[in-house]
Image (tube, grey):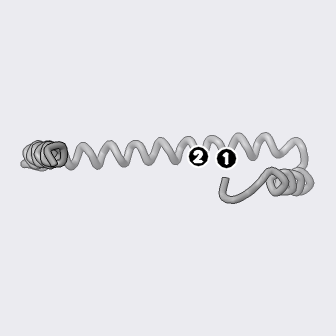
Amino acid sequence: MFGLGTPELIVILGIAFLVFGGKKLPEIGSGLGKAISSFKNGLKEVDQSGKDIVSGIPGVKEVAAVKDQVQQVKDLGNILK
């Protein structure tokens, strides 16, 4: 995890415990978890809206179909070699 080993994580958690105290750490962890969850949900929404926009552009489906056919031909050519 980012090049941090167990001893480093223990030291970081110990310092956090000393700075924030035992009562505040669960609240901080809960807030951090909610923030990460909210960020992931936002990324999913942006990704989905981007896909909706792209699928609404005329010709995208046809280009994707042609691309798949070209890939199939390339795969067939590799098999026959």
Tell whether 45 sits left or right of 31: left
Of the numbered discs in the image, which one, if any, rests on residue 10? none
Q: Residues within 10 Å of mark 2 (few under 14, many from 20)?
A: few
The x and y percentages for residue 80 are: 14, 44
Residue at x 67%, y 52% (from the top left corner): 1
Residue at x 18%, y 43% (from the top left corner): 79
Q: Write down the residue under mark 1.
A: 32
Tell whether 66 sits left or right of 3: left
Q: Nearer the viewer, residue 12 or 2?
A: 2
Q: Nearer the viewer, residue 31 or 81?
A: 81
Circle 2 SS class: helix
Of the numbered discs in the image, which one, if any, rests on residue 36? 2
* Spatial separation of the CA atoms under disc 1 and disc 2: 6 Å
The answer to whether marks 1 and 2 mark residues whose Cβ atoms lie closer than 8 Å is yes
Q: What residue type is disc 2 on? A: Ile
The x and y percentages for residue 30 are: 70, 40
The x and y percentages for residue 36 are: 58, 46
